[in-house]
């Protein structure tokens, strides 16, 4: 790209920590993050403080992770109270002057990571904090690429006007993925530091696990079976490290009891809910990565999604998907085994914290409006980035595309454990014959009693005769048909399990690009816009319209 262009871009970005403003770039005495001649290696204390500074930088983009990933997708809808700038995200009418079109905060993080990586590398070693910065930089670059369709890629810190006048490459998503894989692969086995508890938040949950990042990169690249096998391997190894003892899915369910079925008391009764807690609690073993926000404004940057809960509601599409699921209680008594069925995925209830009635006198229609408060957007001070259920589903996505659809479906319906592997009706021998480590890793005592992700909200799904890969009207004789059908089920499960967490638009985009089918994304998103379906569908049928405009 042209030198003048990169200078203009970085002036617009006005780096928050490294380069406070374009004017400050020209002032050698300005209070910058680092001076050009300051080349002393960072001390251990400096390294830790700088990592905490990078984490603070993530606070500036955390809300946007949710907004850009959910408001533009099919599961999260706007309300009469939604502000114009957020409504533009939903309508795909964002202008270049919008705050959401400006990636400056992302590039500020990247530039600070570059500074930190270069300074710690100069010390002649690769300390653990250096690896953390590589991970933060990679995740941030991925967000820029997924939201703007391209990135300006640089790995040296920009510390002066002269730095901004150099030529830097502009990478597409595939080009960035290739570059990040090369950067992170040598760091795959790196051990992160443990800083203990930071304001009642375990420091290990503030970082991006290297193996999860690499799994995501290979899943996105997906140019060969080997890519999907590598993705599955990294996900499996991370899951196995994360789950120390016992089954990691068993406890995270929301369920009806036998008494509910006896009394048929479903309308007023509340299910036993461990699932919603695992999605919002900072102490949850399910949690992988979150951005810690301040408890109140006097302490720092707060999670404004909580105070703006009235801006958002679940879409009809996700409500219908939850309602269309079958719930099963497989009840075993001393005399008989009985299957009790009812309708509805209980994760719908788990996603609703409660209902409030709001009257806004500024609206033309000042009648009271009932709003369902969404648990994931309101109940936590932090902003969730990743958790174990998400990684299990991405693992299933990778395994499916690696040519093992029944194994992938087992992640949804049965869970992977010794009992599943011993049953040919669940996973055919042909999918297990090659003894791939990313599968056999789950065939140990630790995973005894594993349950499927679908069982988190749909009861004893392992026994549900209606929850299958095919239907009575489908004949799946071709392997590719089976893989596509399982991928559809995985995509649905991603909606049922991870709605409102910031992943949805990227999930739709990844699968749509893999299939070379823009309608896979366009149709569900347009369906959310009932009165504007044709415009949205036509717009999103062209992939260039998936991305935000460059700022002006």
Image (spheres, helix red, strand yellow):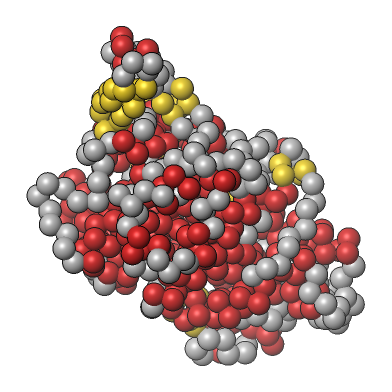
Compare residues 446 and 268 and report the one nearer the observer. 446
Q: What's the residue at 78%, 53% (across, down)?
A: 194
Query: How far from the left and from the top, in percent, is residue 40?
Result: 90, 77
Compare residues 87 and 168 and report the one nearer the observer. 168
- Specify the quadrant of the image occupied by residue 350: top left
Count the marks. 0
In-image side of 378 versus 111 (left or right): left
Query: How far from the left and from the top, in percent, is residue 287?
Result: 59, 45
Q: What's the residue at 28%, 13% (across, down)?
A: 264
Compare residues 485 and 294 and report the one nearer the observer. 485
Query: How far from the left and from the top, in percent, is residue 389?
Result: 48, 47
Question: Among all residues in the image, which is located at the extreme left?
Answer: 473
- Specify the quadrant of the image occupied by residue 79: top left
Question: Among all residues in the image, which is located at the extreme top?
Answer: 263
In-image side of 402 versus 51 (left or right): left
Residue 104 position (above or below residue 3): above
Residue 532 position (above or below residue 7): above
Query: How far from the left and from the top, in percent, is residue 332?
Result: 37, 22
Compare residues 277 and 474 and report the one nearer the observer. 474
**Does the image show residue 137?**
no
Residue 286 position (above or below residue 176): above
**Does the image show residue 421?**
yes
- Specify the quadrant of the image occupied by residue 167: bottom right
Q: What's the residue at 49%, 71% (across, down)?
A: 230
Q: What's the residue at 28%, 36% (across, down)?
A: 464
């Amino acid at each position: 790209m042209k030198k003048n262009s990169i200078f203009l871009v970085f002036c617009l970005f006005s780096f928050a920590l490294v380069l406070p403003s374009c004017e400050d770039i020209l002032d050698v005495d300005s209070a910058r993050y680092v001076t050009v001649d300051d080349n002393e290696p960072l001390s251990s204390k400096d390294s830790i403080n700088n990592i905490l500074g990078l984490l603070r930088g993530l606070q500036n983009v955390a809300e946007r992770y949710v907004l850009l990933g959910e408001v533009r997708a099919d599961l999260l809808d706007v309300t009469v109270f939604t502000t114009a700038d957020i409504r533009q995200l939903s309508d795909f009418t964002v202008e270049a002057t919008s705050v959401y079109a400006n990636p400056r905060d992302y590039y500020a993080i990247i530039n600070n990571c570059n500074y930190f990586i270069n300074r710690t590398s100069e010390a002649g070693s690769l300390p653990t904090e250096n690896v953390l910065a590589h991970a933060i930089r990679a995740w941030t670059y991925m967000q820029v690429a997924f939201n703007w369709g391209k990135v300006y890629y640089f790995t040296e810190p920009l510390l002066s006007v002269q730095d901004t006048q150099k030529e830097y490459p502009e990478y597409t998503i595939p080009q960035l993925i290739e570059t990040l894989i090369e950067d992170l692969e040598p760091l795959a086995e790196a051990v992160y530091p443990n800083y203990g508890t930071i304001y009642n938040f375990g420091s290990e949950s503030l970082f991006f696990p290297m193996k999860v990042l690499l799994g995501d990169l290979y899943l996105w690249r997906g140019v060969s079976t080997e890519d999907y096998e590598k993705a599955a391997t990294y996900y499996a190894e991370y899951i196995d490290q994360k789950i120390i003892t016992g089954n990691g899915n068993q406890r995270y369910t929301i369920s009806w009891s036998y008494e509910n079925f006896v009394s048929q008391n479903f309308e007023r009764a509340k299910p036993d809910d461990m699932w919603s807690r695992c999605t919002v609690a900072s102490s949850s073993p399910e949690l992988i990565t979150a951005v810690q926000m301040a408890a109140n404004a006097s302490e720092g940057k707060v999670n404004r999604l909580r105070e703006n809960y009235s801006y958002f509601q679940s879409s009809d599409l996700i409500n219908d998907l939850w309602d269309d699921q079958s719930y099963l209680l497989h009840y075993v008594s001393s005399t008989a085994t009985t299957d009790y069925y009812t309708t509805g995925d209980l994760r719908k209830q788990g996603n609703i914290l409660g209902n409030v009635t709001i009257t806004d006198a500024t609206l033309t229609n000042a009648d009271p409006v009932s709003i369902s408060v969404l648990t994931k957007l309101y109940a936590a001070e932090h902003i969730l980035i990743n958790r174990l259920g998400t990684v299990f589903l991405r693992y299933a996505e990778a395994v499916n595309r690696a040519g093992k659809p029944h194994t992938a479906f087992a992640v949804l319906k049965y869970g992977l454990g010794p009992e599943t592997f011993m049953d040919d009706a669940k996973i055919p021998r042909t999918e297990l014959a090659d003894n791939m480590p990313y599968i056999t890793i789950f065939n140990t005592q630790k995973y005894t009693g594993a349950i499927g992700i679908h069982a988190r909200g749909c009861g004893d799904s392992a026994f549900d005769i209606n929850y299958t890969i095919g239907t009575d009207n489908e004949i799946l004789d071709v392997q590719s048909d089976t893989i596509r059908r399982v991928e559809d089920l995985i995509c649905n499960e991603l909606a049922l399990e991870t709605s409102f967490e910031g992943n949805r638009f990227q999930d739709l985009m990844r699968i749509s690009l893999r299939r070379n089918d823009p309608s896979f994304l366009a149709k569900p998103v347009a369906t959310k816009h009932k009165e504007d379906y044709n415009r949205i569908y036509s717009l999103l049928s062209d992939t260039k319209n998936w991305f935000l405009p460059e700022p002006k």
